[in-house]
Image (cartoon, grey):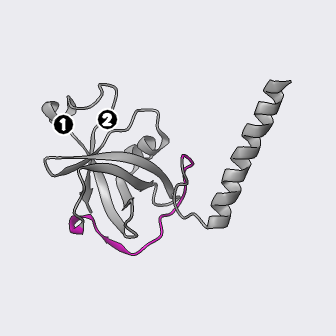
């Protein structure tokens, strides 16, 4: 019986999170849930000074926006992300490298695109099963 109660609680918690997101008018991802179109004033990524690492909201699939929270790293001035093969957002990037990003605490949305990193020395800094991508202005 306790297992059934746990399932009910989990379902209720998920429903509550979805309801909170809808009520709050989320325009991007909410906690671990993906979102859609990122809303905010737009600028070129070349205008942004980056911290060494952090979290960014990344919007893929311009025709049907899909956004997620992802970690990024700044290495030698390059803004890098490292998705795993099975991530939906990585599959979206393979189809269309155009993205939009919004950094924590910054309301501005920056247009960018992703490029695969090919430098073996740089790739070796990341886990072997990851794809290292650079975010560049578009």
- Residue 33 among magenta residues: yes
Q: Name the residue under label 1.
A: 118
Magenta span of residues? 32-47
Circles 2 and 1 in contact, beta carbons < 8 Å = no
- Residue 68 among magenta residues: no
Task: Tell me which residue sits at (30%, 28%) in the image.
Answer: 127
Lateral position of residue 80 relative to residue 83, left or right? left
Task: Tell me which residue sits at (33%, 64%) in the image.
Answer: 111
Give the Cα separation between the discs numbered 2 and 1.
10 Å
The image quadrant that residue 35 belongs to is bottom right
List the single residue furthest toward the right. Answer: 1
Q: Mark 2 points at which residue?
A: 131
Q: Residues within 10 Å of mark 1 (few under 14, many from 20)?
A: few
Q: Residues within 10 Å of mark 2 (few under 14, many from 20)?
A: some
The image quadrant that residue 85 belongs to is top left
Quadrant into which the N terminus falls: top right
């Amino acid at each position: 019986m306790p297992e059934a109660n746990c399932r009910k609680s989990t379902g209720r918690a998920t429903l509550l999170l979805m309801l909170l997101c809808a009520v709050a008018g989320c325009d991007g991802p909410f906690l671990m849930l993906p979102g859609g179109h990122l809303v905010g004033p737009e600028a070129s990524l070349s205008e942004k000074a980056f911290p060494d690492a952090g979290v960014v909201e990344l919007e893929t699939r311009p025709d049907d926006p899909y956004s997620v929270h992802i970690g990024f790293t700044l290495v030698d001035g390059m803004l890098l992300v490292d998705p795993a093969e099975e991530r939906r957002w990585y599959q979206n990037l393979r189809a269309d490298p155009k993205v939009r990003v919004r950094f924590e605490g910054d309301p501005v949305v920056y247009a960018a695109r992703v490029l695969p990193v090919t430098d073996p020395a740089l790739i070796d800094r990341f886990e072997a099963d990851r794809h290292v991508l650079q975010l560049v202005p578009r």
